[in-house]
Amino acid sequence: MEGMRPMTYYAGLDVGGTSARLKLTRRDDAELGEYFGQGCTLNVEGYEEARSRYRTLVLEALKKNNLAPQECAGVCVAASGVDGEETQAQCRRIFEEMGFAKTRLIVCNDCEVLLRCSASADIVLVAGTGSIAVGRKEDGSYLRCGGFGHILSDEGSAYDIAVRTFRLVGDHIDGRAFCPILYRLFTEATGLTQLNELNVYINDHILERPQIARFAHLPEQAAAQGDEAANALLEGRADALFRLLCDTAKKLGKAEEPVKAWLWGSVVAQGSDMEQRLQRRAQASGCVTLMHPPYTALEAAVLTARGLSV
């Protein structure tokens, strides 16, 4: 069936826990469009929810361009929650069901794809809605560290920081901690002033990770205004992210060697407060160089789909 239709375009997807992006390019490199949808983490939201969100994003974009899955010369799906054979098979099944040829489909973790296109880094540390680190072994294969969801890991992620913000504000209300600036910023942002209100809100939204993660910026604002408890919270999360990076280096057998790592995700964006905290730790260690990748995960997905390297 594949040979019956001309291969006219490439597709790259970057799917995180909060948002999903799709880029379509023609075979001559001309851009057809970039499209946005609701993200999902396959190992958290589950197969059926992931299937629905993928289909909505992809099929609507193809329809706008009068394209069919069977015409795709290559598609790379770089997705959060694709962490093993089972989730990879589930993701492949979603796209094969849409009509994409299995021989023209690459599925990988959304941070692994950044390492696929360049040998400039050994590790990529991702901290967005969730967190994970991926390292490239000498044989070209990949290993991961962390990233097993918000219950078991995701340390230093926006969700983790936000949940700890709720706890710290709760302790302040309860007289067990003192974070007056963070408390003021929190109540202004949420309208929540009582412990029972915090409890009801977080229990109602505990599985809606983006809904909770959107408050992760508050400790940074409070720390900048001199809130010591908020600063301590962020220092603890920076320690956790740096440990994740160092643990990945150990798993690669590079514990005593200089390693180069890329930072990726909203929490560790270039110039961010958390990036500066991690840079200080890297400089103190003397064995880690932190950088930012020269392309986005979406661009890397398109390059992977095209079978290119940079």
Image (cartoon, rainbow, N blue to C red):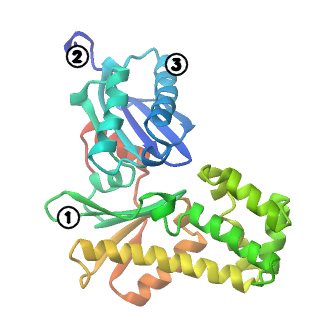
Q: Which residue is labeled 1 in the image?
A: 137
Crowding at dot 2, Cα within 10 Å, few <14 / some 14-19 / many 20+, comes out as some
Three-letter residue code for mark 1: Lys
Three-letter residue code for mark 2: Glu
N-terminal-most mark, 3 or 2: 2
At a point 74% along the width and 62% down the height, the residue shown is 199
In space, the residues marked 1 and 3 are separated at their CA atoms by 41 Å
Tag on residue 170?
Answer: none
> Residue 138 appears in which quarter of the rendering?
bottom left
Q: Position of residue 47 (x, y in %)?
A: 43, 36
Crowding at dot 3, Cα within 10 Å, few <14 / some 14-19 / many 20+, comes out as few
Q: Position of residue 131 (x, y in %)?
A: 47, 62
In space, the residues marked 3 and 2 are separated at their CA atoms by 22 Å
For the residue labelled by badge 1, is the local secondary structure a helix, a strand or a loop? loop
For the residue labelled by badge 2, is the local secondary structure a helix, a strand or a loop? helix
Above or below: residue 212 compared with residue 233: above
Above or below: residue 174 compared with residue 295: below
27 or 23, nearer to the observer: 23
Three-letter residue code for mark 3: Lys
Above or below: residue 55 compared with residue 37: above
For the residue labelled by badge 3, is the local secondary structure a helix, a strand or a loop? helix
Q: Which residue is labeled 3 in the image?
A: 64
N-terminal-most mark, 1 or 3: 3
At a point 35% along the width and 54% down the height, the residue shown is 114
- Indicate which label's residue lies in the foreground, 1 or 3: 1
Crowding at dot 1, Cα within 10 Å, few <14 / some 14-19 / many 20+, comes out as some
In space, the residues marked 2 and 1 are separated at their CA atoms by 35 Å
Q: Which residue is labeled 2 in the image?
A: 2
293 sits to left or right of 257: right
